[in-house]
Amino acid sequence: MKKLICLVLALLMMASAAGADTVINSTENRHITPKAVGLNEVPEDISPTTGRVLSSLPVPKSFAGLALTGRYMPMLVQIDNTNGGVTYYDEGGKKRTRNPWGATYVDIVYESPLYESGETRLSFLYSDVIPSAVGPVRSARIGHAWLREEWDCGFMFYGYQSAAKTNVLAEFERYGADKKGVLFSGTVGSNKAWKQYYTKRKNLSTPHDKNGNAAAMTALIPNSHTAPNHAFLFTEEEMEGDTATVINVNYNHFAYNNTLEYNPRDGQYYRYVRDDHILWTDLDTQTAITFSNVIVQYVHVDWFGTNAPMMQNVVDSSNMKRFSNKAKVAEGNADFFLNGQHVAGFWQRKGMSDRTVFYDADGNELALHPGRTLIIMFPRGDGKYGDRERYVSYR
């Protein structure tokens, strides 16, 4: 009898521990009606992407960016995230270095689906300070091309998806990006002006060694090209919600599962990668890449091959018919984590040239805290990829 009681108590304790995390329902109807929004204007000397005071930002030699030149021209860079993007030891005991560099200066980090089995890719958006060394630069998928359209910015990539229905070059042509002087492919010939700005890092294996001089490539964007105003709202006030000091992002893949832990001393979320719980750091500066804001944006994903995702971060008349989800507007649930708090919300992007707007529970546009933002485009639980084994939780 005592053994049975002990067993029951142990099971109850396990159930209690398992229930400590709140698992987010990515498809629930939150009954949020987005209110009308316009374009946000930021005061002079305030960054539209981070809300930071531009004149207070140090800009190293050979760098570029809004804080130095006064020209608002973001640069989006495809970044390697192989095996979690950290230094680890493989099964044979060999050291593998996969950390990004140039990450210390990034404004926004996007994480999005890459392989059906759970692997992800990163996209770094620079604007305030654009470094002269960024990497490892990797290939693009169709959803990344659509993300570039949102910012209408410079775009650095090393390779691209060419599968049927997800051909990246075809999307560049469809929306005219190939005529704007904003695309910087690393796989072009030496006759292109920017080819010299792609180099290889020593002591790193291919394809994890591609370095790009983002500052130099930004200078090649024609002065006639103007990026749209897609400024966020910012506030110094703390967001009120339920406690969220630990966020678990579970892709059901030991190398890509990651945890974000809130540090109240600096108001930042620190990202730990893999089931090994390794702190995500910049290879060059050896500093942690932290976030003032973490946004989980649930997106519908169709697959046209194991590594050919089509994520519905936007739809319009030319691409709507390609999705199994026939929604005319790209929208869905979103969850926000700021200052150790969580608020359930909503997101919407109406067209290819429109910005993604994030709404709080009352339908008002979300105000971010000044600083870096992580936006996780997570497959929602409505299809083959978004099953119950892949989820986001917090406590």
Image: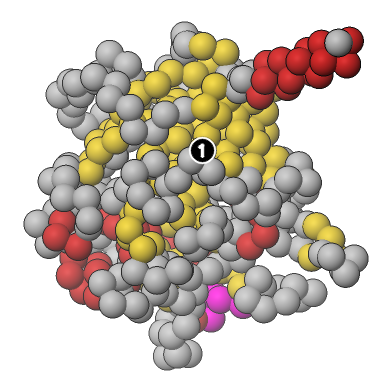
Tell me if residue 17 is in the magenta stretch. Answer: no
- The residue positioned farthest toward the left in the image shown: 317
Could you say which quadrant of the image residue 33 lies in? Answer: top left
What is the three-letter code of the residue carrying label 1? Tyr
Q: Residue at coordinates 68% horizontally, 51% vertically from top-left?
A: 254
* Left or right, 350 with reference to 8: left
**Residue 4: x percent and y percent?**
82, 15
In depth, the one of 362 and 137 nearer the eye is 362
- The residue positioned farthest toward the front in the image shown: 1
Could you say which quadrant of the image residue 172 lies in? Answer: bottom left
Residue 328 vs 364, above or below: the answer is below
What is the span of residues highlighted in magenta in the rendered image? Answer: 196-200
Q: Which residue is mark 1?
A: 391
Q: Residue at coordinates 88% horizontally, 16% vertically from top-left?
A: 3
Q: Main secondary structure of the magenta part?
A: strand
- Residue 215 visible somewhere in the drawing: no
**Residue 271: x percent and y percent?**
66, 38
**Residue 204: x percent and y percent?**
75, 73
Q: Residue at coordinates 70% horizontally, 40% vertically from top-left?
A: 272
Quadrant that contains the C terminus: top right
Q: Few, some or many C-alpha atoms within 10 Å of disc 1 (few <14, some 14-19, many ≥20)?
A: many
Residue 104 vs 192, above or below: the answer is above
* Left or right, 101 with reference to 91: left
Q: Secondary structure at mark 1?
A: strand
* Left or right, 261 with reference to 212: right
Q: Residue at coordinates 82% horizontally, 11% vertically from top-left?
A: 5
